[in-house]
Image: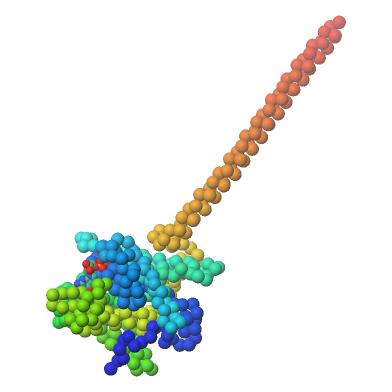
């Protein structure tokens, strides 16, 4: 039997020595994105993950209470995890869910753009002479929330997951698992074979044969895909008196951290314990690399991306560029005005000269006339 999931230390403690040293020194940064239809519990999951992972997280709960309404813009929550002397900067990106619009077709566009923009931003920073301290919000795992229902997975979900899977480590999850009976949940999981049948790329935990326990664990995780989850940041009392994170029903309590009830613990283990490094490495080696090489093929070195970027980082860049441009125009304008002024005064000076010259010519002519006159009268005599 595989050892209990929680007995695994945080991912990076298991690294080969060299990498281990580098990561320990720099600290790892790990970013999770939550996506899917509106009202499936993405924001609740974010709160559940933080409150079950970080001691004393309850203190922050008030801050999030109001967020349990519909999320209207991308929300970024950060926290630092520490185990032994390893530090992981954990970031969760909560996205607004898609609505029940008739035309949902483009609802996923901002998410795809966000993912691409992070690669773009990283790539641009890599091209700068100062490459240290890069701002890196590349997403290492994207959890895609699927509505639990008696039916199969929707065409829209298939469409979005196809796009996500080619850009990011995609982890499909069945939302609100407590709303399905165990039998219906099993049926729903079986129907999820369409994900594979449609050729959607999802993250599958790699099996390392040289470590039997880890290999068993990876197989157990794979068998549970797509993970069924229950989210709640409420403490409730289980029938045996334990206080647990869960949802209270007349029939009893649906517990977040009970493996009989859902796969939350498996998912959390994969993310922040056993497979964090795999997720980081595939993001770097597969997804970032494919973005980079694609862009290199279609763009000249250093050339900007042709469309407008909504990334705040680029907005700053754009703003700075606009300001620099305006300043430059102002400088040029002043230079031109001075030059124009100089030209005018030069023209005036020349005109004055010309007038004086004319005047002296006239005077000379008059003098000449006078001389000629007196000469004529002299000759007559
Ligand atoms: N039964 C059940 N309800 C849940 C679960 N998770 C969240 N909810 C409830 O579902 C409702 C919507 O949850 P949110 O977390 O706001 O959903 P969301 O996906 O962030 O929604 P948007 O921000 O609109 O995209 C809330 O009333 C939650 O309490 C769950 O696992 N089971
Ligand atoms: Mg939300």
- Residue 198 seen in the figure: no
Residue 80: where, in percent of width, then height?
A: 41, 74
Quarter of the image where one finds residue 226: bottom left
Q: Nearer the viewer, residue 199 or 211?
A: 211
Q: Residue at x 60, y 38 (%)?
A: 340
- Residue 249 seen in the figure: yes
| Left or right placement of residue 14 versus residue 97 in this view | right
For the C terminus, give its image quadrant. top right
Residue 172: where, in percent of width, then height?
A: 27, 76
Q: Residue at x 29, y 82 (%)?
A: 266
Q: Is residue 292 above or below residue 340?
A: below
Q: Residue furthest top?
A: 381
Q: On the rendering, which quadrant does ligand 1 occupy?
A: bottom left
Quarter of the image where one finds residue 73: bottom left
Q: Residue at x 26, y 65 (%)?
A: 68
| Left or right placement of residue 58 versus residue 288 in this view | left
């Amino acid at each position: 039997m595989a050892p209990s999931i929680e007995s695994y230390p945080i991912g990076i403690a298991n690294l080969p020595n060299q990498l281990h040293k580098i990561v320990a020194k720099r600290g790892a940064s790990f970013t999770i994105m939550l996506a899917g239809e509106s009202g499936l519990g993405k924001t609740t999951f974010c709160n559940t993950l933080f409150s079950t992972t970080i001691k004393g997280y309850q203190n922050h709960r008030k801050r999030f209470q109001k967020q349990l309404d519909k999320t209207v813009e991308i929300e970024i929550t950060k926290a630092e995890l520490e185990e032994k002397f390893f530090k992981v900067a954990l970031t969760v990106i909560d996205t607004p869910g898609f609505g029940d619009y008739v035309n949902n077709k483009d609802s996923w566009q901002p998410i795809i753009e966000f993912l691409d923009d992070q690669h773009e931003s990283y790539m641009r920073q890599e091209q700068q002479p100062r490459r240290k301290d890069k701002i890196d919000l590349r997403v290492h795992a994207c959890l895609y929330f699927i509505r639990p229902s008696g039916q199969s997975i929707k065409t829209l979900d298939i469409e979005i997951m196809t796009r996500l899977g080619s850009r990011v480590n995609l982890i499909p999850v069945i939302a609100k698992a407590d709303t399905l009976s165990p039998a219906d949940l099993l049926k729903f999981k079986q129907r999820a074979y369409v994900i594979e049948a449609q050729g959607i790329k999802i993250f599958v935990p790699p099996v390392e044969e040289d470590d039997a326990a880890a290999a068993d664990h990876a197989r157990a995780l794979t068998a549970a895909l797509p993970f069924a989850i229950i989210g709640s940041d409420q403490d409730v009392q289980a029938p045996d008196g334990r206080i647990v994170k869960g949802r209270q029903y007349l029939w009893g309590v649906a517990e977040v951290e009970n493996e009989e009830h859902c796969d939350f613990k498996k998912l959390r283990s994969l993310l922040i314990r056993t497979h964090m490094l795999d997720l980081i490495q595939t993001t770097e080696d597969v997804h970032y690399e494919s973005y980079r090489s694609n862009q290199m093929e279609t763009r000249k070195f250093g050339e900007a991306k042709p469309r407008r970027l909504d990334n705040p980082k680029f907005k700053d860049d754009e703003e700075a560029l606009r300001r620099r441009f305006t300043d430059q125009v102002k400088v040029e304008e002043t230079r031109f005005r001075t030059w124009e002024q100089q030209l005018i005064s030069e023209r005036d000076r020349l005109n004055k000269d010309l007038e004086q010259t004319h005047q002296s010519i006239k005077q000379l002519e008059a003098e000449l006339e006078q001389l000629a006159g007196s000469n004529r009268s002299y000759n007559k005599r």
